[in-house]
Image (cartoon, grey):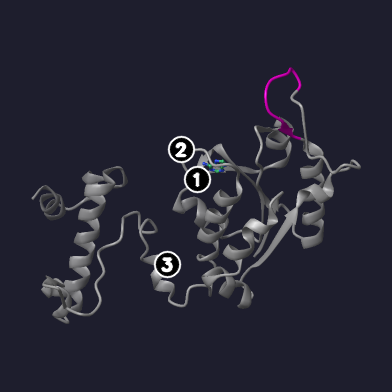
Amino acid sequence: MKIDILTLFPQMFDGVLNSSILKKAQDKGAVEYGVTDFRNYAANKHYKVDDYPYGGGAGMVLAAQPLFDAVEALTEEAETTNPRIILMCPQGERLTQRKLEELAEEDHLIFVCGHYEGYDERIREYLVTDEISIGDYVLTGGELASMVVIDGVTRLLPEVLGNQESALKDSHSSGMLEHPHYTRPADFRGMQVPDILLSGHHEKIERWRYLQSLKRTYERRPDLIDFESLSEEEQQYLKD
Ligand code: ADE
């Protein structure tokens, strides 16, 4: 997969794209990241990318021309057809695991990150294919938000996580939150690991994990559970 990022602050990406799993994913050839300063595409001698709003008002508006030209150049360079062009903004569709799974199927993503009062509306209307928000709060720009999406997509690409099972068992990929985990020692300052996990009885452990996952989801994120679809035993377990 090719992932391009359009930003005025390319240095913000250095550490994140070159650490941990994202670095490994590039080394394995599962993904190629490109970070582009779209100021380089401004067709004026001062490399200006913003301008005053028509109709007046405070703040500057990011102009259409540099972003249209940058997206066209990156699309041509990657020789991909129909890349997803993703604008990071608080007005976008709220990010979910399902959205990450959908994006992980693509072969080219282009993220547009801005730091401005607004984007010229023609960018939204005619250039981008998706607008994504990472939550109901406002950041100074789209860069950190795009890194969240890039991280979440990259770890879903084939071959990226050594243990494919760990992506399948994550919180949210099953629609529920993850069960608790423990490692040695079995007794840490008097705090005990549940006996069942030491029993070696795999079926019972799986069932325990499933019920823990259900309980945690019910307590923390009841909106994720369709109570009616649970067995009577499970419904009773949650009520106890
Ligand atoms: N840019 C600023 N705030 C944002 C948010 N919450 N999500 C995505 N992009 C943003």
* Label at residue 134: 1
Q: Secondary structure at mark 1?
A: loop
Name, please, the residue furthest toward the left: 240
Q: What count of labels does the image hold?
A: 3
Tag 2, which secondary structure? loop
Name the quadrant where ligand 1 sits: top right
Label 3 sits on a secondary structure element that is helix
**Answer yes or no: do the residues labelled 3 and 2 have beta carbons within 8 Å?**
no
Which mark sits nearer the N-terminus, 3 or 2? 2
Check if residue 94 falls in the magenta segment.
Answer: no
Q: Quadrant of the N terminus?
A: bottom right
What residue type is disc 2 on?
Asp
Range of magenta residues: 54-62
Q: Within 8 Å of ligand 1, the CB of disc 1? A: yes
Q: Tell me the residue that label 2 is attached to.
A: 136
Is label 2 within 8 A of ligand 1 (CB to nearest ligand atom)? yes
Give residue 167's mark.
Answer: 3
Report, in whole angstroms, how far the alpha carbon at label 1 lies from the one at label 3. Answer: 20 Å
Q: Nearer the viewer, residue 41 or 94?
A: 41
As rendered, which of 23 and 176 lies closer to the eye?
A: 23
